Amino acid sequence: LIAEKKSLVAKMVADTWTTLEEYPYIVGDEIRATLEERLFAYFESGIKDQRAGFEPSPSSPLSFFLHGPAGAGKSTFVSALACALQIVIRRYLHTERRCQIVKVPLNSMTADTLN
């Protein structure tokens, strides 16, 4: 079963990149290399057995920081990734699962806004 689970997760990760490209969003090598392992861990943590659907472990959240100048495509990437994840999870594991993003603009946080 472990080999089958890893094979399924590898297919899901590959399908996520393919789905992102259909969005259309061209995924750069740096983003792919950075997120590949995290995607694998996220998908793997959510698969318990064939009947359980998809429940990712709180200890393996899919979270990351993006930085870059305005207009670089950070928001576009995050939106495209959320769509791709939802499509892939629905296709393979759970037909009603929704993916949502939480976007926090860190550059607007100051000591005053945190208190």
Image (cartoon, helix red, strand yellow):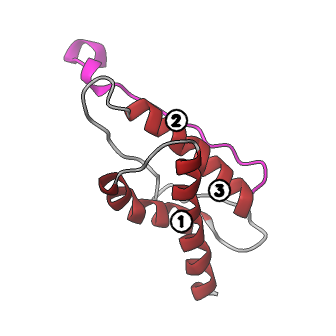
Question: Is residue 49 found left or right of 37 in the rendered image?
Answer: right
Q: Amino acid at mark 3?
A: Val
Q: Amino acid at mark 2?
A: Ser
Name which of mark 1 and mark 3 comes first in the sequence.
1
Instruction: Name the residue carrying label 3.
Output: 88
Q: Which type of secondary structure does the marked residue at label 2 adopt?
A: helix
Q: Which type of secondary structure does the marked residue at label 1 adopt?
A: helix
The magenta stretch spans residue 114: yes
- Residue 79: give its label: 2
Question: Is residue 111 found left or right of 34 in the rendered image?
Answer: left
The magenta stretch spans residue 1: no
The answer to which of 34 and 73 lies nearer the viewer is 73
Question: Is residue 60 shown above or below 113?
Answer: below
- Residue 6: give its label: none
Marks 1 and 3 close (CB-CB < 8 Å)? no
Question: What is the x, y in percent for residue 64?
Answer: 36, 46
Question: Is residue 115 shown above or below 67?
Answer: above
Give the mark toward the camera: 1 or 3. Answer: 1
Question: What is the x, y in percent for residue 1?
Answer: 64, 87
Name which of mark 1 and mark 2 comes first in the sequence.
1
